Image (cartoon, rainbow, N blue to C red):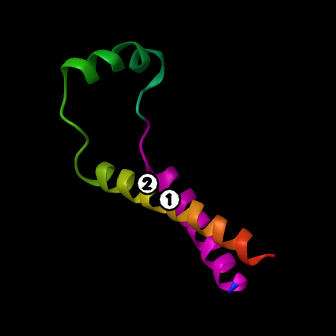
Amino acid sequence: MHTLFLTLLVIDCIALIVLVLLQSGKSAGLSGAISGGAEQLFGKQKARGIDLVLHRLTIVLSVLFFILTVGVSYFAI
């Protein structure tokens, strides 16, 4: 059981790294940092398309990462 959780954890880690690297940045330098707050307050709708899918998959894989980490530590004893 420990080996299964450890294998799934490694696969999850690799998938999580790839998903984070595929996502686009939220701001583009200093100008993005200054105008970013105004866009969130007044402006555009929430992210759509592939950015939203990547964001949700990142959340799912990060929760799975924590669950698998607890499982690996539980079965390591």
Residue 74 among those drawn in magenta? no
Q: Which mark is residue 59?
A: 2
* Residue 44 shown left or right of residue 32 in the figure: left
Above or below, comparing residue 31 to residue 69 in the picture? above
* Residue 75 shown left or right of residue 63 in the figure: right
The front one of 35 and 59 is 59
Q: Quadrant of residue 1?
A: bottom right
User: Residue 68, image x and y in percent?
Assistant: 60, 69
Above or below, comparing residue 50 to residue 15 in the picture? above
Above or below, comparing residue 38 to residue 22 in the picture? above
Residue at the spot x=52%, y=57% of the render? 62
Q: Quadrant of the C terminus?
A: bottom right
Local packing at callout 2 (Cα closer than 10 Å; few below 14, some 14-19, many 20+) is: few
Range of residues picked out in magenta: 2-25
Give amino acid for label 1. Answer: Val
Q: Quadrant of residue 3?
A: bottom right
Residue 23 among those drawn in magenta? yes
How many marks do you count on the picture? Answer: 2
Residue at the spot x=23%, y=38% of the render? 46
Q: Quadrant of residue 50?
A: bottom left
Residue located beneath label 1 in the image: 63
Q: Which mark is residue 50?
A: none
Residue at the spot x=48%, y=62% of the render? 61
Secondary structure that dominates the magenta span: helix
Residue at the spot x=59%, y=73% of the render? 11
Give amino acid for label 2. Answer: Ile
The front one of 76 and 3 is 76
Mark 2 or mark 1, whichever is nearer to me? 1
User: Residue 34, image x and y in percent?
Assistant: 40, 12
Q: CA distance from mark 2 to mark 1?
A: 6 Å
> Which residue, as the protein is rendered here, is positioned at the far right?
77
User: Residue 19, image x and y in percent?
Assistant: 48, 57
